[in-house]
Image (tube, grey):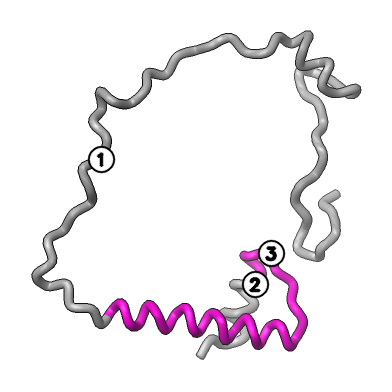
Amino acid sequence: MIDDKVLDSVLYMSKLQVSGEEKEKFRKQIEEILSYFKVLTGVDTENVELSAGEGIPIEDLRVDEIKDSFSLAIIKTFAADFQDGYFPVPRILEDASGGEDK
């Protein structure tokens, strides 16, 4: 059973805010997921050969090359407020209280 401290920690790290009823539903879902891991720990892998796959040969990887990008003049047209080589973009994350970061 997952105690409240662990559940609150998972919710905080996940940036989730749930009601009391949703919290219990979430707790049951996590416990169900963990039960699958218990099943996996019972699988006998004693005689299974380890294999991480062949991977990609080094010669098949692309070469890193410096390529031309947008000029600073073009980049400045993207935003009205451009200062010291930077421009603001809309926020996409919120703080833990559900409001926007300040």
- Is residue 28 or residue 99 the one in the foreground? 28
Which of label 1 and label 3 is nearer to you?
1
At x 89%, y 24%, the residue is 81
Identify the magenta region: 12-41
Figure quadrant of residue 60:
top left
Residue that mark 1 sits on: 55
* Label 2 crowd (10 A; few <14 / some 14-19 / many >=20): some
Which of label 1 and label 2 is nearer to you?
1
Disc number placed over residue 19 in the picture, else none: none
Main SS class of the magenta portion in the image: helix
Q: Secondary structure at mark 3?
A: loop
Residue that mark 2 sits on: 11
**Where does the image place residue 13, in percent across and percent down from the top left?**
62, 65
Disc number placed over residue 15 in the picture, else none: 3
Report the amino acid beneath label 1: Gly
Figure quadrant of residue 17:
bottom right
